[in-house]
Each structure stands twice: as C-alpha cells, then as structure tokens.
C-alpha cells in the first residue's frame, strides 16, 4: 500500500461548482497536512496547512483532516477557471520530509 | 515568487555532460530539499539538508551529487545522466527539517538527450 493515495483525475467542473479533493494515507504518525496547487510549468504553491485534525478555512478553500479515518480533504467553493491546476496533498510526521500524493488535475470551465 | 529561486529554469544536456542546478532561498530557513517530479508520478524526495548537514538520501543514484555550502544555497551536480532522468527538479525549503510547511522554487526542467 502506498503511503499517500490521491485520485489523479482529471476532474472537470463548471464554473461556480463546489469541488472536493481527497487523499488517504496509511501512516498514523503523520501530523502535518498540506495542500499545494501547481500550475503548468510552475513549482507547487502552498495553499493550505493544517496541523493534526480539524478544519481550516481560507476564503473559498476549506481543508479538513480526519486522523481517525486517515483521510484529508480540500473543498473549493464557487470554483473559478483560475482554479484550474493540479492539486497535490502532502503530509509528514515530526522530523520527516513531506510525502506527496500523485496530484489531482482540476479543470474549471467558464 | 515564493522566496526560493532555482536556476537554470530549463536545461538540455547530453549523457556525457556535467552540469549543476542551483537553488537559493531568502526565507531564513534551515532545511532544504531536492525533489524530482516525473509525469504521472508523485514528487519523489531525493535529498534533505538540515542546518547544512545531509540528513536523508533517498536511494538516489550517484550520478546525482548534492552540495549545501550554507543554509541558503543548495546545488545538485549532475554527470553521466540517462534519458530517464529527464524531469522537473524542484528545490524546497522549510524552517527546519520535517516541521511543516515547505516552500518550493519554480523548478528546473531537465532534458537528457
């Protein structure tokens, strides 16, 4: 079993839709959870950071961590064409480097 | 810009060439990383430096040789690469090794011919 599983998509939605992106993981020691957004030919850009369990909201983005289920989610409300990108989940345990999912490619059409 | 700068942005090299990738961070971080990103694969961690000391080498072939002269600079020296080494090489930094958020540069797109 891979440490981090992420459905690569692609995921296509109309403008204004609510998007749900998810990752599952196997290592119960993971405590730091991140979502990155990567546009074509660019480096990953940190979008959301959560420590341990719970929710975090930033504008149209909400990150959720459920450690009991080893499941993390990113919700995008009122999606825009500019949200079209690849979204990478990443996580780490204390003192270890980030482990990434494969990324989900999202396309938002106007 | 994220405060992590990589040069060059694009590199084409022959299998017998020697080249180096450079990364510089202006964030005051103490940990720096090299990742490899290939199509349809997760980012692969290559090397980790924490306070200039290499703390992780993820079974990377010896044709990749990292160097970290100080906490702000990181190099990846390349020699006798193979075509399958063609990928996007990403540098990242964080406050300290394994302590949460890492910030990435824009990457070097490497093509080995």
Image (tube, rainbow, N blue to C red):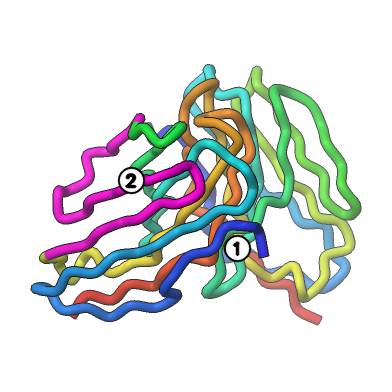
Q: Position of residue A90 (x, y in %)?
A: 56, 41
**Residue beneath the point at 82% across and 44% down:** A62
Q: Position of residue B46 (x, y in %)?
A: 33, 45
Q: Main secondary structure of the magenta part?
A: strand
Name the mark on residue A18. none
Q: Position of residue A85 (x, y in %)?
A: 64, 67
> Disc 2 is attached to a residue of which chain?
B
**Residue beneath the point at 33% across and 77% down:** B11
* In magenta segment, residue A65: no
Range shown magenta: B55-79
**Residue beneath the point at 28% across and 69% down:** B86
Name the mark on residue B46. 2
**Residue beneath the point at 77% across and 75% down:** A81
Judged left or right of residue A74, residue A22 is: left
Label 2 Cα neighbours within 10 Å, binned few <14 / some 14-19 / many ≥20:
many
Q: Quadrant of the C terminus of chain B?
A: bottom left
Judged left or right of residue B72, residue A34 is: right
Q: Are marks 2 and 1 in contact (CB under 8 Å)?
A: no
Q: Position of residue B27 (x, y in %)?
A: 64, 48
Label 1 Cα neighbours within 10 Å, binned few <14 / some 14-19 / many ≥20:
many
Q: Nearer the viewer, residue B80 or B74?
A: B74
Mark 1, residue position: A38
């Amino acid at each position: 079993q891979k440490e981090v599983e992420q459905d690569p998509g692609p995921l296509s939605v109309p403008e204004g839709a609510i998007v749900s992106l998810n990752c599952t993981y196997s290592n119960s020691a993971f405590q730091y959870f991140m979502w990155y957004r990567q546009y074509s030919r660019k480096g990953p850009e940190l979008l959301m950071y959560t420590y341990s369990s719970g929710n975090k909201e930033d504008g149209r983005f909400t990150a959720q961590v459920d450690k009991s289920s080893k499941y993390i989610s990113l919700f995008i409300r009122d999606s825009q064409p500019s949200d079209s990108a690849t979204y990478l989940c990443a996580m780490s345990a204390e003192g270890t480097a980030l482990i990434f999912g494969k990324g989900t490619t999202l396309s938002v059409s106007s | 810009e994220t405060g992590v700068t990589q040069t060059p942005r694009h590199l084409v090299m022959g299998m017998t060439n020697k080249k180096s990738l450079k990364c510089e961070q202006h964030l005051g971080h103490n940990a720096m990383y090299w990742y490899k990103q290939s199509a349809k694969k997760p980012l692969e961690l290559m090397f980790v430096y924490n306070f200039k000391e290499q703390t992780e080498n993820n079974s990377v072939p010896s044709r990749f040789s990292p160097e970290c002269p100080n906490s702000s600079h990181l190099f990846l020296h390349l020699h006798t690469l193979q075509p399958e080494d063609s990928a996007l090489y990403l540098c990242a930094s964080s406050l300290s090794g394994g302590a949460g958020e890492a910030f990435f540069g824009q990457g070097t797109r490497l093509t080995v011919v």
